Amino acid sequence: MPFDESGHPGPPRGAGQRAINLPPVLMWLIGINVAIELVRELLSEAADSDIVLQFGLVPAAYTSGAGPDLLSLLIAPITYQFLHGGWLHLGINMITLAAFGVPVVRALGARRFLLFYLSAGIVAGFVHVFFFPDSGDPVVGASGAISGVFGAVLMLMRYVGSIPSLLPIAGIWIALNIFFGVVGGTPGAGGDPVAWTAHIGGFVYGLVAIRLFMPRLGP
């Protein structure tokens, strides 16, 4: 069970363990996101804008046929997940990933988690494209993928009986995303529009798809 550490052998806490005891796959994801933001800080505003347009997810590029080159269209559903709208946006996402990612990594293993995480971000991005097909604004950030991780955490908690029903939590979470998406004011957004449909799409994907990524136990 991903939330039960009683049977995990090993040294007691504090005996040679890392100060930040996150699974390596989470450390790598956080490190890559931070490194990309650091590199962007060194670029001119024009160069940074070009990167966001090239590697962010622009719905109209997929629906109008007048978007960037084919390679950008193919990789943008992944690369947009590693671009953020500033340090506050990045910090909130990475803290959330660290908070919710650990039990999902323990349940899936590193490789399955990475596939799940990236696929949640891809699905979340195309949910946004579906609802806003004519938008020329690039979507950036790991929020859709992390929403999938949050959905997975809730489903894992449901499996082990930690929560009796998903409906109240899921309902409140979806309502908050709709509210902040329509009204604005989400922390870290900096006043920019929030891709709330991507958040909800990633969350629902996490609830539904987590069981597909669970490793099989025995024959």
Image (tube, rainbow, N blue to C red):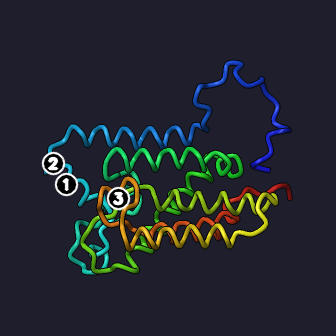
Q: Give the crowd class for mark 1: few <14, some 14-19, many >=20 residues within 10 Å.
A: some
Residue 218 got which mark? none
Given residues 173 and 199, the one toward you in this image is: 173
Residue picked out by circle 1: 49
The kind of secondary structure element at disc 3 is loop
Q: Residue at x 82, y 60 (%)?
A: 161
69 versus 62 height, above or below: above
Which amino acid is tagged 2? Glu
Given residues 124 and 184, the one toward you in this image is: 184
Which amino acid is tagged 1? Ser
Structural distance between the alpha carbons of marks 3 and 2 = 16 Å
Task: Measuring from the top left, give residue 84's x and y in whole percent.
Answer: 34, 52
Residue picked out by circle 3: 140
Q: Residue at x 32, y 66 (%)?
A: 193
First in sequence: mark 3 vs mark 2: 2
Q: Residue at x 56, y 51 (%)?
A: 114
Give the left or right position of residue 118, taking residue 18 as reference: left
**Marks 2 and 3: in contact by CB < 8 Å?**
no
First in sequence: mark 3 vs mark 1: 1
* Quadrant in which the C terminus is drawn: bottom right
102 versus 190 height, above or below: above
Given residues 123 and 90, the one toward you in this image is: 90
Task: Measuring from the top left, give residue 126's x and y in whole percent.
Answer: 42, 72
Residue 45 got which mark? 2
Task: Measuring from the top left, give residue 104's x and y in whole percent.
Answer: 66, 51
Give the left or right position of residue 106, taking residue 96 as reference: right
144 versus 7 height, above or below: below
Q: Residue at x 24, y 79 (%)?
A: 65
User: In terms of image quadrants, where is residue 209?
Assistant: bottom right
Which amino acid is tagged 3? Val
Structural distance between the alpha carbons of marks 3 and 1 = 12 Å
Give the left or right position of residue 42, taking residue 197 as reference: left
